[in-house]
Amino acid sequence: MTGDAAIILIVEDEPPIRRLLRTTLGAHEHRVVEAPTAKEALSLLRHERPDLVLLDLGLPDMDGKEVIQRIREWSDAPIIVLSARDLESEKIAALDLGADDFVNKPVGVGELLARIRAVMRGRERRFSAQPKFQFGGLEINFPARRVLVEGEEVRLTPREYQLLRILAGHAGQVVTHRQIITAVWGTDTHADAQFVRVLMAQLRQKLEANPASPELLLTEPGIGYRLSCEE
Ligand code: CA
């Protein structure tokens, strides 16, 4: 792999969408391999060892969610799911099964490339822990547990800090309500998505210049949140 170039496996049964993805990714120096069925995808995964999988959930021979399970039985290649905008429950199920993120259909090219960059960077981050996160006016110093906005220290409660930490650990990627609840309240809890919304409102008050129209802590309606890391 040189620079940002990667081997990307496209799993999609519709030829026009495959063509669009191939052209887009090829133009950004990614090497593309394609599978129109789940069966071919699982075979290519073994033989090509892609750096990333773009997976359509509606395939002719297998449910996309089952494909995720099959991939996760032995591979931790990042998976970005391609899904219809209004199918929140399908996206949540895919993320819970181990997908890393999703892109809504019809696929926006800029959004897709940003998602790919974010999951690839996320991988690197997990393998080389960085003591600091910095984006725009926000700086998080993890060892010191310090958070600064425009150079000024901001005091967070332990739960606010845990919420920010899990989002920063997946910067640019979606984090589901369930992932947040587990990270902040643990598994043995009655906390639900409403708890997350209240905590997020508090965090936005402290970090956002205009909490009513956030630029850092973005909402993914019905699914979770995303910490912005792209200009
Ligand atoms: Ca399809």
Image (cartoon, helix red, strand yellow):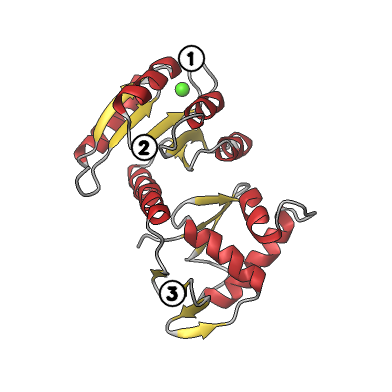
Q: Which residue is under mark 3?
A: 139
Query: Tag 2 or tag 3, which sits nearer the N-term?
Result: 2
Residue 158 in picture, x, y percent from top left: 65, 72
Q: Quadrant of the N terminus?
A: top left
The tally of labels here is 3
Placement of 37 over or under 87, stated as above or below:
above
Query: Tag 1 or tag 3, which sits nearer the N-term?
Result: 1
193 to the left or right of 228: right
Q: Which residue is under mark 1?
A: 60
Beta carbon of the mark 1 residue lies under 8 A of ligand 1: yes
Residue at 51% in and 25% down: 70
| Dots 2, 1 in contact, CB < 8 A | no
Residue 214 in picture, x, y percent from top left: 52, 66
Three-letter residue code for mark 3? Glu
Q: Which residue is under mark 2?
A: 52
Residue 150 visible somewhere in the drawing: yes
Query: Tag 1 or tag 2, which sits nearer the N-term?
Result: 2
Residue 17 in which image quadrant: top left
Residue at 39% in and 71% down: 136
| Dots 3, 1 in contact, CB < 8 A | no
Which residue is more in the foreground, 38 or 198?
38
